[in-house]
Each structure stands twice: as C-alpha cells, then as structure tokens.
Image (cartoon, helix red, strand yellow):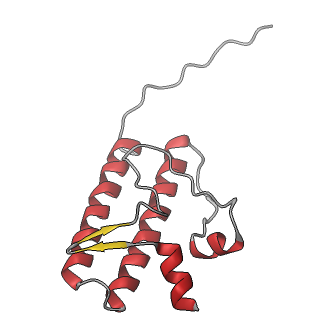
Amino acid sequence: MLRDAHQATVKAKLHPGKLDFSAKIPNYTAGVIVVADNTGTNKDKFFYPVGRYYGEFTPEYLAFNANLQEFTQRVSIICGLEAGGKISPQAAYEEIRTLWKQLKASKQNLLDQQYPPQVELPDGD
C-alpha cells in the first residue's frame, strides 16, 4: 500500500536518463516566487511540507526560501528513487545538478541584485 501511495504521489515518469516530475511538483523558474499548495489533503501536507520562514522579511528572501524548499523536496525524491533502484546514480546526479543550477540562478536573480534605495515619502502634515 505504501508503495502504491508513493507512486501515486510522485507520479514520476521515468525515461532513460531523465526524470519528469511535472505531474505533481511544478518546475520553478529563477526569480519567480513558488509557493507550495498546502490547501490539499493531509497526504499532500505530509509528502510536500512547507516550513515557515523566520528570517528577515523581504519579497526576495521569501521567494528564495520557497525555491530552496522546492529544491530540497525534489532532491529528496530523486535520492529515494536512486536508493530504490528506480533510476541510475548517473541520472540522479545529472538531475540534481540541473536543479542546483536552477537554484543558483534563482539566488543570482533574487539575492545578488542591486536594487535602488527606497525613497522615503514626506509626511502629509
């Protein structure tokens, strides 16, 4: 039963040397806020947990945190598939490497940008 639940949740379509997680886990683009949908069932909350963000709040930090959580979730699934013999170690490495490049680009687009200082507006007294 656990195996069926795992297969139904991940819905990974295995191709030689390539994984496709698009059925359940959305692919993120660098610099785009990704918010996991935890409005679903308890099963979704269990398999795709979303941690709270306690750091300094800026939209960029929040977006990068969401992308980082998405990265860790995907790496966890890939490691489980490789450990279970469903994919080769080389395919797992290549997929994780691709995800790492996406996360690195997200960091560069969100955290390494120089934004102009915010102008303070005068009070309307």
41 over 1 or under it: above or below: above
Nearest the eye: 108 or 115: 108
Q: Nearer the viewer, residue 55 or 45?
A: 45
Instruction: Give the number of marks.
Output: 0
The N terminus: image quadrant: bottom right
Query: Vertically, is 105 above or below 76?
Result: above
Q: Position of residue 11 (x, y in %)?
A: 45, 72
The image quadrant of residue 95 is: bottom left
Residue at 49% over, 64% down: 24
Vertical arrangement, residue 112 with respect to residue 10, above or below: above
* The quarter of the displayed image where residue 17 is located: bottom left
Quadrant the C terminus occupies: top right
**Quarter of the image where one finds residue 51:** bottom right
Indicate the position of residue 44 as horizontal and vertical percent values: 63, 70
What residue is shown at x 31% (from left), y 74% (from top)? Answer: 14
Q: Residue at x 55, y 19 (%)?
A: 119
Residue that protrudes farthest toward the right in the picture: 125
Q: Position of residue 71 (x, y in %)?
A: 42, 65
Q: Residue furthest top?
A: 125
| Residue that appears at 19% across and 80% down | 90
Q: Position of residue 43 (x, y in %)?
A: 65, 75
